Image (cartoon, rainbow, N blue to C red):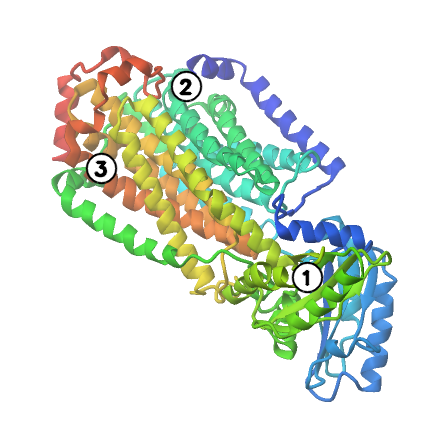
Amino acid sequence: MAAIARWCVTHRLVVVLLWLLALGGTAAGAVAAGSAYSNDYDAHGTESGRATALLQEGFHGLGGDTDTIVWHTADGSVRSPATERDVTAMLDEVAALDGVAAVTGPYGDRGAAQISADDRTAYAVVTFDGQADDVSAGQARAVVDTAKSAEGDGLQVEMGGTVTALTEASGGHVAEIVGVAVAAVVLFLAFGSLAASLLPIVTALVSVGTAYAGIVLLGHVMTVADFAPMLGMLVGLGVGIDYALFIVTRHRSGLRRGLAVADAAREAVATTGRAVVFAGATVCIALLGMLILRLDFLNGVAIAASLTVTLTVAASVTLLPALLSFIGPRALSRRERRRLAEHGPRPDLPTGFAARWSAFVERRPKLLGAFAAVVMLVLALPTLSLHLGTSDQGNGPASSTTRQAYDLLADGFGPGVNGPLTVVATLDGADDKIAMDGLAQTLRSTDGVASAGPVAYNGSGDTAVLTVVPDSSPQSRETSALVDRLREDVLPAAEQGTSLQAYVGGITASYDDFAGVIVAKLPLFVGVVIALGCLLLLLAFRSVGIPLKAAVMNVAAVAAAFGVVVAIFQWGWLSEPLGLGRGGPIEPFLPVIMVSVLFGLSMDYQVFLVSRMYEEWLETGDNRRAVRVGLAETSRVINSAAVIMISVFLAFVLTGDRVIAMFGIGLAAAVALDAFVLRTLLVPALMHLLGGANWWLPRWLDRLLPRISIEKPECRDTGRAGIPPQRARDEDELVA
């Protein structure tokens, strides 16, 4: 690491130009290639996946996504001649638009079911040529604008569906701007130097910008969800600014001790840079753990987020020292430079609140540890009611056209019309056709079914499809139970004695299948992530207790963060005032992605805190002193880093995107609890109570494990030699 830092400082201009070239090159490539994101929730081998494949093969043109145009009149009837004339003209215009395969309206012999019983609401189904991912934003906007043109004279027109959602603008780049601005203020307050406060932000922006463009290009070679770039930016800005903050803090400490600029930068990278690389590796390992689930949708997210973290780490240990050498002594504030010139170098000892708090924890570890444990337990309780399912457009902001279309349909036709199920079957002969017609009659009398449409057969007569409307909303547990009942009881009974093969599909069934696959593999995934994280800590700190405590702390942070997410997004606490829509189930992929990110971020603070304690333990062999000094010297920078990361994460709530808001609030809650409850209360309290057992490792295991180190190189040589007596007296007086 020291050699890397030395080269980067010596060739600082080359390093800066290489990074700018990487940013410009990837950005140009991304602009030229365009995006190719895909929200493919299909889990291979599921029943909903087979239903979709059969529908696309048997009914060419019906495999595309569908949206809904809904119109409502407060007075009068949608059957009035004037309304019928205006709406029919609008539907004909929509049908002629590029990308639209068909429009099925209510004004015809078979459209009576698309008009509500009170004649106030009606809807038409717009079928597109392909999936929503293949519809351009311009095509989607044209459909919405054309539909909206029929509004007026008491007629309200709204649109719902996946394609329409493409036109609903998010917060743009407001979230990133707000997050970066808050981070800049915190950094300036922490450093007192404008130049020093800008470097972490510049480093993070360059690395995250390069990664963002790289993710756009990645979408052309593998499945990458449309929220992956935003998720990568969210995580990248948070960890990127934090990693740079830790290194700049160490660099400033070296300058105050009288080191030359180049020497201070080299020492910062050789010491704190090691912890940054190690912490970044743990985040990437946790993210790449998603690959064991073997879901294309999550593979792209894992690689995209890992790419972002990798580039932020690389920028922190290469670009940052080059920039530090450019600003020279201006990394210190004017007051610090003046004090250094007048009084000369001084040891950088912990003072103020950080030192007093560390001593306070040392005196009352049992009380403070119990308090922290109770806080984490209470916040984790809502996690017990976690419901994974379809978070649909009924959970959107009340002002959006998709939410208003959803509500109009639910009020006029019942909640199930927003998430119909599709039964697709293969047939072989007249007996199968008779069985299919009988199945339609059976479904209409099945509990939980509001209606079942007529059976439609393809031209060759070997594939049939019918639509089933539940009497419950798409996201309810009752609808999921209906899907299971149809698959386990109703369809097998209809197939008995025939060659009929029927499958339940539709968006609700797809989400249920996707959630089922994830839940089945979640224990394995969590176990692998915990095991790999513990192994890394075992190698780094040569201790059994440190990895075990880290695993427990990480689980506590994840559970408490999910408790906050459930309370806000599932129970609906404060969700409407925050502009996040009403409460609903949690997206099925959210637990996997959040567990990956949260385990990685939790490990970051564990590494930065315990590495300083371990360094002191190697020098003194005194556990109480190691814990006290480690907490006193790292708590301030960890808390500053946490404030920055929390600000960045919370700013992403401004995007208005429910999924990104879930990530933002969940990650912000986890970081806040991790930094201010776990790392400053529970972890040091437990380490004081366990004493020397913190660092115990069986001799036979010590001989078998390879040696890696994240502490200063000289610490490995000094072993447990005593520290200079004057330094010990100075520090003891400060915390007394």
User: Residue 563, located in which quarter of the rendered image?
Assistant: bottom left
Instruction: Between residue 302 and residue 568, name the one nearer to us.
Output: 302
- Mark 1–mark 2 distance (CA, rounded to whole Å): 68 Å
Q: What is the quadrant of the C terminus in the image?
A: top left
Q: Is residue 326 left or right of residue 492?
A: left
Q: Which residue is mark 2?
A: 261
User: Residue 495, located in which quarter of the rendered image?
Assistant: bottom right
Q: Can the viewer see residue 216 in this picture?
A: yes
Q: Amino acid at mark 1?
A: Thr
Residue 247 drawn at (x, y percent): 40, 27
Marks 2, 3: nearer the viewer: 3
- The mark that comes first in sequence, 2 or 3, is 2
Q: Amino acid at mark 3?
A: Pro
| Secondary structure category for the residue under label 2 | helix
Instruction: Between residue 387 and residue 275, name the one nearer to us.
Output: 387
| Secondary structure category for the residue under label 1 | strand
User: Residue 2, located in which quarter of the rendered image?
Assistant: top left
- At horizontal 68% and vertical 61% (from top left) the residue drawn is 422
- The mark that comes first in sequence, 1 or 2, is 2
- At horizontal 59% and vertical 34% (from top left) the residue drawn is 211
Q: Which residue is mark 1?
A: 422
